[in-house]
Image (cartoon, rainbow, N blue to C red):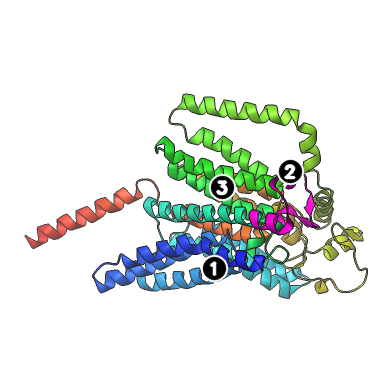
Amino acid sequence: MIDTILTILATSIYLPAVAGFVRDIRNTPTSPVQTAQHRSRQFLLGCLSLELVSTLAFPSVMYIAGVLTVFALLVYCIVQRPKLRFNSLLVVSLLYIIWFAVSLLWSGNKGNGAMVLFTQCLPIVLAALISSAISISRDEISKLLRTFCYSAYIFAALIAVSWAASSYELHLSPSDWSIMQKTYICGLSQYQWLFRFLGGHITGYLHPSYNLLPMFFAVIAASWLCKGGRAIQHLLWIFLWLCAFAATLLTQSRMGILYSVIILLTNCLYLPSNTRRRFAYTAVATSAILISGAFTHDFWQQYGSDTARETMNDYAVRYIKTKPLTGAGAGNMNPLEICRTIGETYWPNYGQLPTEGEIRQWPVHTNMRPHNQWLADWVHAGVAAALLTLMLYICVIARCYEDKNYWGMAFILIFTIFSLLEPPLYIGKGLYLFCSVSCLIFASSRPGENRTKEQGHKNKDIRTSVQRI
């Protein structure tokens, strides 16, 4: 019953996105042609906002929002007839999906490989297409990220409500919840109780690293929105960072600690108004982190150890040495393929593997991939797949550097580090967050672009006035 109530409350995460869409769609021009153009554009922007917000909530809504975004893109293209701007993200994403399609030739499971093309590769291509079809102004980016931050505050409140409800149900006091110890409560991990509003404490989406990743991106977005504001405005991102850090401690997330430290350091470099303050704040924060890390080195070494992760990565490296160019082929990356190729019979967190039977019979949703994005890609479709994924990241980094885009650069920094320890492009929340953010990065108007457009409109108005005279 509590899970049902909390799941219903979780729908409030979408309220800021819905409210923003209704507000923007109502401000329509009087001309019928302009109204159609305005509404098609706002419909696409509203779907992008919903897609970004849904990375905080249920994966099912995230996929529904993806379908709506594709429909909104078709409507936008029919009404607006935009000229596609070929960018590096679009080119690399097309090469990415083409290579995985080629790898079907040697895949032992072509049906699952086709599913990989549809669920993993196609969203990246669609995000790149949207970024090449629409140009989003700085004000519109600010609205989208502000809406996302409002949803992140609701997400933090839902964690607190779940914590209180679970404490009441289990008759626990706050002191009974351990911090950073990987302990269990009633046979379940603590994060299962804290993220129970995402579909239940057993059947819901409960992975702490992927649930906290969008929340920490919201901290980055809030920091960018507060840049140059008054001191009281900076309390918004500080409070959100504290909420995310508290959730990290309670959910016992190792990745959350990395997110917290990285964002704290990047904000020290970005937010201060002059170089002297940046140097001072960064030096103080770095010194505090290094000193605390030195005193707790043994704890972090023990806490960060993961035998299962290390074993899977070791198996992946051995498999890559066996098939460095081709890999397993799209859809054929699974424990049976890896272990039978390298001569092993045991897979971490699963046990002894069957020695007979076809590899294609392995269940689709229990792939249990290597915990590294590039190792997983290399195993999946060879060295070309790993290089193309690396190029995707480099394209985003290069664009952020050219545009001096802080929120994009900080996101891709933590996402890259995350990719060294997880395969986020194979997991729905990681994939759709990457697609949403990279789409906004490449669709955002470049510095000076809006001024050029405004000047062009002014010149056009002047020519029209002269002709009338």
Q: Which residue is mark 2?
A: 180
> As displayed, is residue 438 above or below residue 198?
above
Measured in 3D between alpha carbons, the distance from the residue under mark 1 to the one under mark 3, in whole angstroms, is 21 Å
Q: Nearer the viewer, mark 1 or mark 2?
A: 2
Residue 345 found in image quarter: bottom right
Helix, strand or loop at label 2? It is loop
Q: Is residue 438 left or right of residue 463?
A: right
Measured in 3D between alpha carbons, the distance from the residue under mark 3 to the one under mark 2, in whole angstroms, is 24 Å
Of labels 1 and 3, earlier in sequence is 1
Q: Nearer the viewer, residue 79 or 13?
A: 13
Exactly how many numbered labels are in the figure?
Answer: 3
Q: Is residue 180 magenta?
A: yes
Measured in 3D between alpha carbons, the distance from the residue under mark 1 to the one under mark 2, in whole angstroms, is 35 Å
Q: Are marks 1 and 2 in contact (CB under 8 Å)?
A: no
Q: Which residue is mark 1?
A: 66
Q: Which residue is mark 3?
A: 411
**Given the image, on which type of amino acid does mark 2 rest?**
Met
Badge 1: residue crowd in 10 Å (few <14, some 14–19, many ≥20): many
Q: Magenta span covers which residues?
A: 164-192
**Given the image, on which type of amino acid does mark 3 rest?**
Phe
